[in-house]
Image (spheres, rainbow, N blue to C red):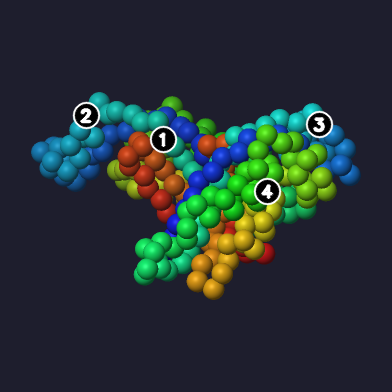
Amino acid sequence: MLLTRKSEFSASHVCANPSLSDAENRALYGMASNPNGHGHNYVLEVTVEGETNPVTGMVFDLRELKQVIHEEVVDPMDHRFLNREVPPFDRMVPTTENIAIEIWRRLQRRIDRPDVNLRNVRLYETSDLYVDYGGES
Amino acid sequence: MKLTRRYRFSASHRLDVSALSPEENRRLFGKCNNPYGHGHDYVLDVTVEGAPDASGQIVARHALDALVGERILQRLDHKNLNTDVAELADGVPTTENLASAIREMLVPDWPLAARLARVRVAETDRNIFELEAS
């Protein structure tokens, strides 16, 4: 059984590699390389997989899932400038791909247990762009 | 890791199979058989799969946009799918056939490091067609 919980956070970022020139960053990241930053309303869909507990009728307690997502993602990232305020994005470009990988890393250690696993992190940067990450290297 | 990018195009079409009688076409396609055609605001989701490169991206957005823009949007947006698109000339432009045609327009000489994983075409909010790229 798959269970998906949706959350939102709003944050600003700059997609630029400090070791590259402005022109090189513009070629790589386009408008997202503006040094002063810009922002998005990110939408996060966290999917966990497990068997339905025969006693509780639940795969995962939604209150706990909500709390974990808030503690690991929404509280530290909402209304923040990711590059300046949210490690590791002080040294890693906060592309949607890298943010999804970091969210996976933060959530997996809180969610995985013998009978439940984090299955997928879907992160929408806008309604027209999202990434899916399932822990693959 | 997969990345999905959404595009839009507006086009007209008419569903009609020449091998069938007018009555059979009306029965098969209903309103979609209207002789003068009709149109939709199609929504196309293109999914690519790969590992992020040194830039932290699976694909540079502008490279994917340029590819889909050149191969799909310029060919389909504000066009008549029955008459203006060679890839659809031989068949009835159902959204099943449209999704297959879009995949075939993207696959040959695919220039990006990330592989094409999926094409998803929504004719309206209620009718959605999806196929894996390989």
Q: Nearer the viewer, mark 3 or mark 4?
A: 4
Contact? badges 3 and 4 (CB < 8 Å)? no
Q: Residue at x 80, y 39 (%)?
A: A84
Question: What secondary structure is marked by label 1?
Answer: strand
Front-most of residues A28 and B86: A28
> What is the residue that sits farthest to the front in this orientation?
A55
On the question of residue B56 being in view, the answer is yes
Whether marks 2 and 3 lie on the same chain: no
Front-most of residues B40 and A56: A56
Which numbered tag is attached to residue A99? 4
Q: Which residue is mark 2?
A: B35
Residue B69 at x, y = what percent? 56, 36
Q: Which residue is mark 3?
A: A35
Question: What secondary structure is marked by label 2?
Answer: loop
The residue type indicated by label 4 comes to: Ile
CA–CA distance in space, label 1 to label 4: 30 Å
On the question of residue B67 being in view, the answer is no
Whether marks 2 and 1 lie on the same chain: yes
CA neighbours of label 2 inside 10 A, class few (<14), some (14 to 19), many (20+): few
CA–CA distance in space, label 3 to label 1: 35 Å
Which numbered tag is attached to residue A68? none
Residue A19 at x, y = what percent? 89, 44
The residue type indicated by label 2 comes to: Pro
Quarter of the image for residue B26 reads top left
